[in-house]
Image (cartoon, rainbow, N blue to C red):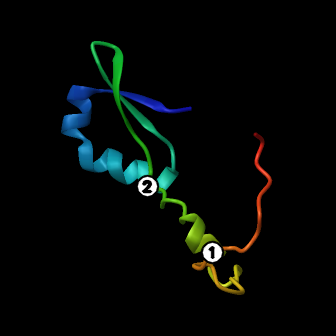
Amino acid sequence: MPRYVKISEFKAKCHALIDEVARTGGAVIITRSDKPVAELVPHRPRAQSARGILEDELVVIGDTISRVDVEWNSLR
């Protein structure tokens, strides 16, 4: 369950709250007039791109640039 902190408390304890989030992995919701305005969450690395995930797994065989000599039957 996230912890709710008033913005004035966040200003006073910013460094300690950042350390707490990094240590516990929990979120801190920052409020102004009892309404949430921001969320402090631990950093999570972005997912790799599809190319990075398939690196060394996907092999292209043949020519991918030149035209394909195939007749396509189109609907007329």
Q: Nearer the viewer, residue 55 or 72?
A: 72
26 lies left or right of 35: right
Task: Label 2: state its secondary structure.
Answer: loop
Q: Which of 63 and 40 is in front in this view?
A: 63
Question: Residue drawn at (41%, 36%), measured in percent from left and top?
Answer: 28
Instruction: State how many labels appear.
Output: 2
Question: Residue drawn at (27%, 12%), measured in percent from left and top?
Answer: 33
* Mark found first going from the N terminus, 2 or 1: 2
Task: Look at label 1 and name its amino acid.
Answer: Arg
Please tell me how crowded label 1 is: few (under 14), some (14-19), or many (20+) other residues with Cα within 10 Å: few
Can you say whether 52 is above or below 36 in the image?
Answer: below
Q: Residue 43 carries which label?
A: 2
10 lies left or right of 35: left
Residue with the mark numbered 1? 67
Whole-percent x, y for residue 57 in the image: 71, 81
Q: Quadrant of the C terminus?
A: top right
Task: Look at label 2 and name its amino acid.
Answer: His
* Alpha carbon distance from label 2 to label 1: 46 Å
Whole-percent x, y for residue 38 in the image: 34, 31
Please tell me how crowded label 2 is: few (under 14), some (14-19), or many (20+) other residues with Cα within 10 Å: few
Question: Residue drawn at (25%, 41%), measured in percent from left and top?
Answer: 13
Task: Label 1: state its secondary structure.
Answer: loop
Can you say whether 45 is above or below 12 in the image?
Answer: below
73 lies left or right of 32: right
Residue 34 quadrant: top left
Residue 7 quadrant: top left
Can you say whether 70 is above or below 62 in the image?
Answer: above
Whole-percent x, y for residue 49 in the image: 54, 65
Residue 32 quadrant: top left
50 lies left or right of 58: left
